[in-house]
Amino acid sequence: MATELPFTDVLRDRLGPARHAVRLGSSPRSRVWRVELGGAPAVVKQAVESADADERYAREVAALRLASRVTPPVVPRLLGTDPGARVLVLEHVEHRRPSPDWVVEYASALARLHAATASDPADQDQGALPAWQGPVRADAEAFLALAGRLAVPVPDGTGAELTALLRRLGTVPGGALLHGDPCPGNDLHTPDGIRFIDFEQSALGNGLTELVYLRMGFPTCWCVTDTPEPLLREAEAAYGAAWEAATGGAPPGDLVDACAGWLIRGDALVQRAHRGAVDHLARLPEEDWAWGTVTARQRLAYRLGVVARLTADRDDLHGLGRLAGALRERMLGRWPGLASPPRERPEDG
């Protein structure tokens, strides 16, 4: 594998020769090696040729540079780049097995990452990354259509609630540095704290969009888990405290709105390569498919339960909450084998 290492002259002139290259596992969208630079370990990553390879590479480099403002660090140090070859070189950090309450430290680190561009924004931040894209009208319509396919009545006013939800999500204050895929496996737990990696989908948006990954079972990830409520509350409090320490105020936005936004997105039922192609909610009545720790129907049933509970006292989402509860009951009745997601983080995450 060492002969395939894309350590270009540009990188060699800056960092010296790379030795003892070992190919590491990675997503199909990248190639990754561990190397030695001057006797110290480092990581070389190359974005694989594809229609969006240049964009993914540019996002990752921009996000790493923005996140480097945070102290203590929340990302590995960016040692060098070669945009022509879409290669970046990172400090190597050792990952250790996360503690049972890892979500608390994770949430705190996530808040500090988000605050990198929200606590002291620079003029160039707004153009460094694209704005996060939330759910759209087609997502709301697909969700309501699923209710029809499963013969679940839609409470009066639910359509208007979804319209208002989309409007709120589209206007909530943004500016936070979003990871884009803050999943187990993209967080390295070190003795000195958590470092996030793989920023190919990073964007600027509202931080609660990613904080609710804990409640919604990591909606863009293979490893859906059901975090116990006491740990959820502790993690969310840790996020709020870290955000306030960095910015001087409370996190903007609404946690329940953010959860509802993930619920209605059919693309949050499939891997990234399959998003944006078809209405995945329309597939569910006739088809189920596995991805990671659960199936698509398990994912949706879990999220329905979360939103049904969270909206119980929300007048502005009352209809959606009733619909979510009814849809979950219909799914469990029709497919009684739908189990809850695992409680523990998978070992290889």
Image (cartoon, rainbow, N blue to C red):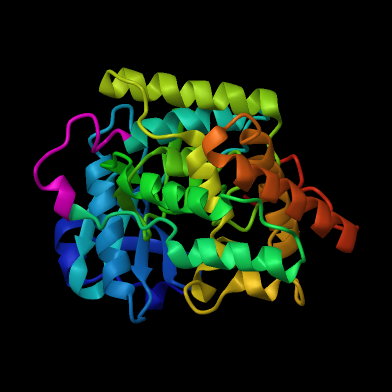
Q: Position of residue 110 (x, y in %)?
A: 42, 36
Tell me, yes or no, if residue 315 can be seen here.
Answer: yes
Residue 125 belongs to magenta span: yes
Instruction: Kindly report the secondary structure that dominates the magenta region of the rendered protein.
Output: loop
Whether residue 154 is situated above or below residue 289 in the rendered picture: above
Q: Position of residue 60 (x, y in %)?
A: 31, 57
Tell me: 324 left or right of 102.
right
Q: Is residue 126 rendered to the left or right of residue 314?
A: left
The outermost residue toward the front is 156
The location of residue 173, given as percent across then percent down, is 29, 39
Q: Quadrant of residue 119?
A: top left
Query: Residue 236 colored magenta?
Result: no
Left or right position of 288 against 312: right
x 29%, y 23%: residue: 246
Quadrant for residue 311, please give it: top right
Up-down: is 129 above or below 275? above
Residue range highlighted in magenta = 115-127
Q: Nearer the viewer, residue 50 or 338?
A: 338
Residue 190 visible, this angle: no
User: Residue at 69% of width from left, 63% of height from top?
Assistant: 147
| Camera-side residue of 323 and 263 | 323
